[in-house]
């Protein structure tokens, strides 16, 4: 029984070993077949890749051949160009050589001709001397002396002509030099004259006040220049600042404002505005009182309050360097005397003389002709027709229709024409600066404009609610272009457009 079990166990083991062998063999064969398929696939992929590489190599080789061919053609064309340039240079050199040879031959011919002419000249001179010896019975030495005498006479004439020429040139140079010296002297005098009439000097208690006027980051001086419309010059001169403006009225207000601020010691933008408003009112009252005093002194009451105020305002107006109020009073008094001597109405002539330039008090603010402005004012306040005729007639708009008008015209010319009364340079300058301001103020949304720095700069203040920063840039260019087209001026003019936003609130 035990043997039977042992044999069956051995048989089972043998059978298991045999079946395991066959299973391993089958598995190995399938694995080898898979590896064979995989190897064949890889071989095909490598073969395909090799074919692709070969094709790419052929394409690159072909491209290189084409590139080399192009490079060869380029070099060939460059070589042809060089050959052509060399040939062209050779042709130019040959042409220059021929031209040089021809010029050389021409010079040689000219040289030979000159030699022949020299020989002919010597022959003619010798023949002339022989003839003179024969005809005048002169020896060779005497003939030579005679010729030299004639040559000397001719030379003297030429020398005299040269002397006259240089005398004329010296005279012209002298005149130019004299004119230059006069121009230099006039320029120096004109500078003093312009300074006299275009600037006010303010004395400060100490240099510390300069810093206060400038303020932190320059805010005080900016506020002053913006409000007052003047140029404030603060330099190294101890204890002094300068207020510059062509407008006498504006400059007088600015001077008074700064003097009050310096005395008070409180200098800041709010205080500046407060003092400026107060001084403006004072000046309005002051100008009215001055005009009223003039009318009272001349005995010309009644007169409209507006005309009286404008008469006082003329103290701050100049025409060709002559103070407008002084000129007006001079014309009024001269017209009175003339009218009295001609049997006219003294009072009427004086009134017409006093009001003949009244329009000048408005030209700096409104522009236009002072004649038209004056006539409009006098008609508005029902002045005598003779006064209106005198305003028109003194500039040739009408003929004088009475003794009084004629007296005013004559007195105006006498007052203006007397030596030292007027200076045209200042008037043309102020007119030019006024034109620059008028161009700026005529633009839309411009609130005010001030020409400063002797007319070389204009500051234009615009309404911040109506115009943007970008539009401010365009506006500055428009103003600059219009100034270029309409105004004659030396150098250049800087146009500054200033847009300021201000917010105000009250705590209650």
Image: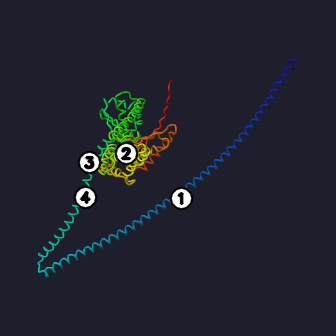
**According to the image, label 1 marks what residue?**
73
In the displayed image of the protein, which residue is found farthest to the front? 343
**According to the image, label 2 marks what residue?**
355
- Other-residue count near label 2 (Cα within 10 Å), few / some / many at <14 / 14–19 / ≥20: many
Q: Which residue is at 77% across, 31% downward?
A: 24
Q: Is residue 501 left or right of residue 276?
A: right
**According to the image, label 4 marks what residue?**
172
**Label 4 to label 2: alpha-carbon separation:** 50 Å
**Label 3 to label 2: alpha-carbon separation:** 38 Å
Q: Earlier in the sequence, mark 4 or mark 1?
A: 1
Q: Which residue is at 39% across, 54% downward?
A: 398
Q: Earlier in the sequence, mark 1 or mark 2?
A: 1
The image's mark for residue 185 is: 3
- Return the x and y of residue 150 as percentages of the image width and height: 16, 72
Q: Earlier in the sequence, mark 3 or mark 4?
A: 4
**Foreground disc of the pair 4, 1:** 4
In the displayed image of the protein, which residue is found farthest to the right? 1
**Foreground disc of the pair 3, 2:** 2
Q: Earlier in the sequence, mark 3 or mark 2?
A: 3
Quarter occupied by the N terminus: top right
- Other-residue count near label 4 (Cα within 10 Å), few / some / many at <14 / 14–19 / ≥20: few
Residue 453 in sight from this viewpoint: no
Secondary structure of the residue carrying tag 3 is helix
């Amino acid at each position: 029984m035990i043997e039977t079990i042992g044999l069956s166990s051995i048989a089972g083991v043998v059978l298991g070993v045999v079946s395991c062998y066959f299973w391993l063999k089958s598995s190995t064969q399938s694995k080898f077949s898979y590896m064979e398929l995989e190897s064949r696939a890889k071989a095909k992929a490598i073969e395909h890749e090799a074919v692709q590489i070969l094709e790419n190599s052929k394409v690159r080789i072909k491209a290189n051949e084409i590139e080399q061919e192009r490079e060869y053609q380029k070099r060939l064309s460059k070589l042809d160009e060089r050959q052509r340039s060399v040939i062209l240079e050779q042709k130019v050199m040959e042409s220059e050589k021929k031209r040089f040879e021809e010029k050389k031959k021409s010079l040689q011919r000219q040289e030979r001709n000159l030699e022949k002419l020299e020989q002919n000249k010597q022959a003619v001179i010798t023949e002339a001397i022989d003839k003179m010896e024969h005809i005048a019975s002169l020896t060779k030495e005497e003939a030579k002396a005679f010729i030299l005498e004639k040559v000397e006479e001719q030379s003297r004439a030429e020398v005299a002509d040269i002397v006259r020429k240089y005398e004329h040139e010296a005279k012209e140079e002298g005149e130019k030099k004299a004119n230059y010296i006069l121009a230099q002297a006039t320029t120096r005098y004109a500078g003093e004259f312009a300074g006299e009439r275009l600037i006010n000097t303010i004395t400060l208690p100490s240099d510390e006040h300069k810093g206060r006027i400038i303020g932190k980051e320059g805010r005080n001086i900016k506020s002053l220049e913006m409000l007052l419309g003047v140029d404030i010059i603060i330099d190294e001169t101890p204890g002094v600042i300068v207020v510059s403006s062509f407008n006498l009225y504006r400059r007088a207000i600015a001077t008074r404002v700064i003097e009050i601020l310096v005395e008070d010691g409180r200098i800041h933008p709010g205080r500046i505005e407060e003092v400026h408003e107060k001084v403006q009112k004072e000046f309005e009252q002051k100008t009215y009182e001055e005009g009223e005093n003039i009318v009272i002194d001349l005995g010309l009451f009644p007169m409209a309050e507006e005309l009286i105020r404008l008469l006082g305002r003329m103290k701050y107006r100049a025409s060709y360097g002559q103070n407008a109020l002084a000129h007006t009073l001079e014309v009024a008094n001269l017209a009175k005397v003339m009218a009295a001597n001609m049997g006219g109405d003294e009072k009427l002539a004086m009134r017409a003389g006093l009001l003949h330039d009244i329009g000048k008090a408005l030209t700096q603010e409104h522009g236009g002709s002072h004649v038209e402005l004056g006539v409009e004012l006098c008609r508005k306040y029902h002045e005598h027709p003779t006064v209106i005729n005198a305003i028109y007639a003194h500039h040739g708009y009408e003929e004088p229709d009475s003794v009084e008008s004629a007296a005013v015209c004559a007195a105006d010319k006498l007052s203006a024409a007397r030596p030292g009364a007027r200076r045209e340079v200042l008037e043309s300058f102020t007119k030019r600066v006024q034109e620059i301001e008028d161009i700026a103020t005529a633009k839309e949304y411009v609130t005010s404009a001030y020409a400063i720095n002797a007319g070389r700069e204009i500051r234009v203040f615009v309404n911040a609610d109506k115009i943007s920063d970008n539009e401010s840039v365009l506006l500055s260019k428009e103003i600059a272009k219009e100034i270029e087209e309409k105004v004659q001026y030396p150098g250049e003019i800087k146009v500054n457009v200033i847009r300021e936003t201000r917010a105000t609130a009250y705590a209650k």
